[in-house]
Amino acid sequence: MKFGSKLIHNGHEIDKTTGALSTPIYQVSTYQQDIFVPQEYDYSRSGNPTRKALEETIAILEGGKRGFAFASGMAATSSALSIFSAGDHIIVCEDVYGGTYRITTTFFQRFNLEVTFTDASNLDNIKNSIKKNTKAIFLETPSNPLLKITDIKGAVKIAKDNDLLVLIDNTFMSPYLQRPLELGCDIVIHSATKFIGGHSDVIAGLVVVKDEALAKRIYAIQNGFGAILGPQDSWLLLRGVKTLKVRLDYQQQNAIKLSEWFVKSPNVNKVYYPGLLDHPGREINEGQADGPGAVLSFEAKDDETARRFMKKVKLAAVAVSLGGVETIISYPARMSHASIPKNERERLGIKDSLIRVSAGLEDIDDLIEDFGRAFEE
Amino acid sequence: MVFDGNEKKLSIDTKVVHGGKCYDPLTGAVSFPIYQSATFRHPGLNQTTGYDYSRLQNPTREEVENTLAYLENGSFAFAFSSGMAAVSTVLSLFSPGQHIVVSDDLYGGTYRLFEEIYKKYGIEFSYVDTSKIKEVEASIKENTAAIFIETPSNPTMKVGDIKLIADLAKKSNILTIVDNTFLTPLFQKPLDLGADIVVHSATKYLGGHNDTLAGFVVVNDINLADRIKLIQKSVGAVLSPFDSWLILRGIKTLSVRLLKQQENAITIAKWLKNNHKVERVYYVGLPEHEGYETSKKQATGFGAMLSFTVKDEALVEKILERVKLIMFAESLGGVETLITYPIVQTHSAIPKEIRDRIGVNEKLLRLSVGIENAEDIINDLEQAMGC
């Protein structure tokens, strides 16, 4: 079955009891038990039928064995990182999402988890960062917000040679465009708030693994720490994922057209998008993903132009987040990457003239007309 | 993101994403809040925030109503707890002794409502083939108050010429009511063509996920709107805040869903046409369909509903038993492909003589095409038909 059909038909499309085409929302905390007979559900932190339907669905879509749903993307990331112990070292790609940067450099540091940030788009950097106590590599590709591409298979090879786990944040691509477990990664993490939910109305995170022993370690944290996703939000994600392909196909098409338009614009210095011919990671991305995705960034010709654009744009929402049906533009220096110090930001290439665009489902002509107007003085 | 009054110029695929207000003005939230509140605190005596009690108006319902009005190019929209509640509200506009001309090929639930409930109140109905303007004209009587059409019709996809019917109706002071469920405002805007009232079962394409029941009425005329508002708030068949929000959420992907569904429907209709076990295919998008030209004139798409008859009646049961990907269920318009057997499901309430006349027989199956991969749907049909 092709991916577009799997989104609709994955074993959770029909309620076994009533035949309902929508998974029931089990808004329940506890379950009547027969203490002499073991049963699947006893308490909703440990397991809930609606959440389970979502967890199994994402596992199927990512080509994994077990899925886990969390209260946010950061809860998913934090729970996955919690499988490590004090004294362990992990290598993290340097232009990682600001929230991941913050949690690894503050919270996990207090528990003596050692972290090295490096530009993972150059595999030698990963190799050179490995130490005796290194346990894992944490990747994001395309990266945020500069859309740098990391060679997943290359990184996996280094990891396997050194007995390391590979964790990858697949939020930007979603399983429709990129399935890292098939490329050898061990743990896939999602902010499902983005393309998987797709409507800018749910905060959620997902983790998928293919190894049963690893699944047990993740489950122990999900159940123990308890940063689980509620039944209502689980159901909204199940609803959102049904249209993942039709949304993302259209959003990607809009992103391609926008990237070409930005390239031609005299108000733009540089466009970061893996779909562009001159993007340094384009070929690697084509080898590991089924498309360039729907997020791009551009540098306006100066800070003033960037600020004017942000102020005058009407059709796009000026907001953090991405992956929704509405076009969202954000200003990384002040929003998603504000927690990274300015000098560090500039070293990473996140200038004050940089704007990130998450293409939505609007008509491309309307978007281009609005963006053109937003650039005008 | 602030619209400045030029929004009418936007394309419909942009409009569906942003809806009426497009965001919550108070907090900036890009998803409209669910106001799960029955009542509203008054600032003082004789003062109101504009909201008093949720049966009268609720902010979330108001947003989905405004969105529908905006998409249908109407001035006023009203949300109801089901498509039938919407149709029923429109019927409540009429009085005993009045006569309504109705498409003979229409949803069985509508037929049942007219025959078993409104007939008892003394409203008269004539069922005619509204794809033929002569038949419509001939059925108009002195007491005719409205013409109620479904186009494309359900399940044989007949196309009524909305503008011709509305022009004819206007001459005799008759209201034209169009059930726009099958095409949605994405493809067809009956008010622009002269209709007075548009009704929807929003359970179908507008909601789009087979998980919410809802109905709408949309009008342009303020007097008509006042009368409908009175019925809505008095009878109280209103749409709940959460369901209003789910419909708002559904509408955001209306364009991408329906375009994909239509593309799939065209592929499947062509495949069925060339299948030796199939007798006849009813799909407006096939050039040989008798309503093809009219449809091209008044709509920008053909939709994703199609029906077909098989040559051998015995095959029907096999198909319904063997389909795996396609689900045997009533309803339509969702992301999943559904197959329906009209004679026993949607149209069982319609008497045999009308059914025979319109072609709803033992060999007819209806398909609501979903957004799955077309090849997978065809493979499933192929194995179910034993091709």
Image (tube, rainbow, N blue to C red):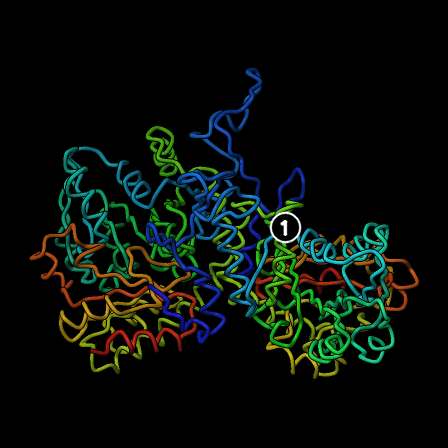
Instruction: State whether residue B6 is above or below residue B60.
Output: below
A23 vs A280, left or right, is right
Location of the N terminus of chain A by quadrant is: bottom right
Q: Can you give x and y, in whole percent of width and height, for residue B151 in the image?
A: 71, 70
Looking at the picture, tell me which residue is in the foreground, A161 or B330. Answer: B330
- Expressed as whole percent of the image width and height from the top left, the position of residue A50 reads 51, 39
Vertical order, A89 against A1 (above or below): above
At which x and y percent is residue A35?
Answer: 55, 16
Residue tagged 1: B232
Observer able to see residue B47: yes
Q: What is the chain letter for disc 1?
A: B
* Position in image of residue A348 (x %, y %): 13, 61
| Nearest the eye: A65 or A140 | A140
Q: Residue at x 45, y 63 (%)?
A: B17
Residue B155 in the figure: left or right of residue A122: right
Q: Amino acid at mark 1?
A: Gln
Secondary structure category for the residue under label 1: helix
Residue B328 in view (yes/no) = no
Front in this rendered view, residue A328 or A323: A328
Residue that appears at 62% across and 72% down: B191
Residue at the far front: name it: B46
Depth check, front residue: B231 or B21: B231
How many neighbours does mark 1 have within 10 angstroms: few (below 14), some (14-19), or many (20 or more)? many
In the displayed orientation, state which residue is furthest to the left. Answer: A343
Residue B106 position by quadrant: bottom right
Quadrant of image for the C terminus of chain A: bottom left
Res A228 → quadrant:
top left
